[in-house]
Amino acid sequence: MFGTSGVRGSVGDEITASLALDVGRALATDGAETVVLGRDARASGRTLSRALSAGITECGGDVVDVGVQSTPTVARAVVAEGADAGVVVTASHNPAPDNGIKLWSADGSAFDEDANARIADVVEAEVFEFAAWDNLGSHRRLEGARDRHERALRESVALPDDLAVVVDLGNGVGRVTADALHAAGCDVETLNAQRDGRFPGRPSEPTAENCATACAVVEATDADLGVVHDGDADRLMAIDERGRFVSGDALLALFARREAEAGDRVAVPVDTSLLVADALAEVGAEVTYTPVGDAYVAAETRKPDVAFGGEPSGAWIWPDRTRCPDGPLAACTLAALVGAAGSLAGLVDDLPSYPIRRDSIRLDEKRAVVDRVADLAREEFDDVSALDGIRVETEAGWFLVRASGTEPLVRITAEARDESDADELFATARGLVDRASDAD
């Protein structure tokens, strides 16, 4: 039922008020006495949130409703309110017809596999523990969660007061980023700042293609950088002062090198570029690999020698501040980094550049195909890891074949230190997928 980022799907099909009601019931049945509830700007979120609240209170849990907020704002509120759990109604970067439910632990990290499995088991077995008529839970509205998030950003990051920043909110709920930068004295220009769950300004996912307008605005103005969010602002991507979209791997390398010291580790998923490991080696630190998904990265950051965690997709975790991917915190941290260095383009250009190839193939039987790829890969290669999907290491580089946790896709990644090796590794990986999908 739950993927790597909660449960997501099309509204009225996979995602219904009935499902939300049962998830709420399951949360309270599982022992959550107080639950922080929030949602993104999608219109369907209002109905789903009401259903979740009804389910929680029906089974004796109390709801603290923060309303329409960014996902990291909600996760921080879970900790600040001393709640047992949190729930965000969001499909994050998915398109407008979708919605979803993501659950948060008391420490502000996403539910792990075991916790999600417990909730799914209760929902599927319908073994809810309903409260007596005179012991139903309460529902109260909490104001000021975003203001508290903004204050935390300004207290934890020394923001420069002389930067010009373009902030593309993607019609989502990440206004706290613009507010924090503006309060620090930055010259802030916003794009797609009107909250609208239809995402009329651009598709929600902050890819280079979707952020072309923001890139053009940064290039045409005197902006020092651009920052872009997805619909719930757990993701952050960036644009340098030349109008170039910065890759997630480059951002990960910059953040990791800033946060890690000698002997530290940085948690990254198995699809991360070699340049991150190389950047960390310069300061005597190293990477530790996790399955893809911010919940896995967050879990690894609980270890004392892990200073930072991140994903090239745009999720960044500072464990000493929050274990939720916090796009606004990442935006402020990047602004501070650029203020100190003077140029985001210069920082990026100083990084090594390795050719990396990524693609996705739509396959309904995604997990069966990846299982067959595993068998084929073990027959042909010596260094094969099954931490998440199948990662094959060779002298030239590596490739990864894995099933998406949220969509009917098989994702292929290949990287090497020169173009021809990257192309060859990608072709090899694609060939394995083709052979596996053609198998009876």
Image (cartoon, rainbow, N blue to C red):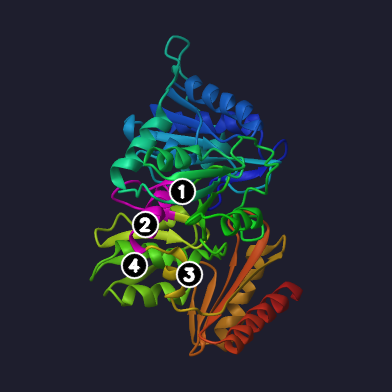
- 439 up-or-down from 189: above or below: below
In terms of sequence position, does the residue under pointer 4 or pointer 2 come before the other? 4
- Which mark is in front, 4 or 2? 2
Q: Residue at x 61, y 27 (%)?
A: 46
Q: Residue at x 58, y 83 (%)?
A: 422
In terms of sequence position, does the residue under pointer 3 or pointer 4 come before the other? 4
Q: Real-space Cα distance between discs 1 and 3?
A: 19 Å
Which residue corresponds to mark 3? Answer: 272
Which residue corresponds to mark 1? Answer: 327
State if disc 1 and disc 4 touch (CB < 8 Å).
Answer: no
State if disc 2 and disc 3 touch (CB < 8 Å).
Answer: no
Which residue corresponds to mark 2? Answer: 339
- Which mark is in front, 3 or 4? 4
- Is 197 on the left or on the right of 147, as rendered? right
- 70 up-or-down from 270: above or below: above
In terms of sequence position, does the residue under pointer 3 or pointer 2 come before the other? 3
Asked whether residue 328 appears in the rendered view, the answer is: yes
The numbered disc on residue 208 is: none
- Is 409 on the left or on the right of 377, as rendered? right
Q: Is mark 1 on a helix, strand or loop?
A: helix
Within 10 Å of disc 2 (Cα), the crowding (few <14, some 14-19, many 20+) is some
In terms of sequence position, does the residue under pointer 1 or pointer 2 come before the other? 1
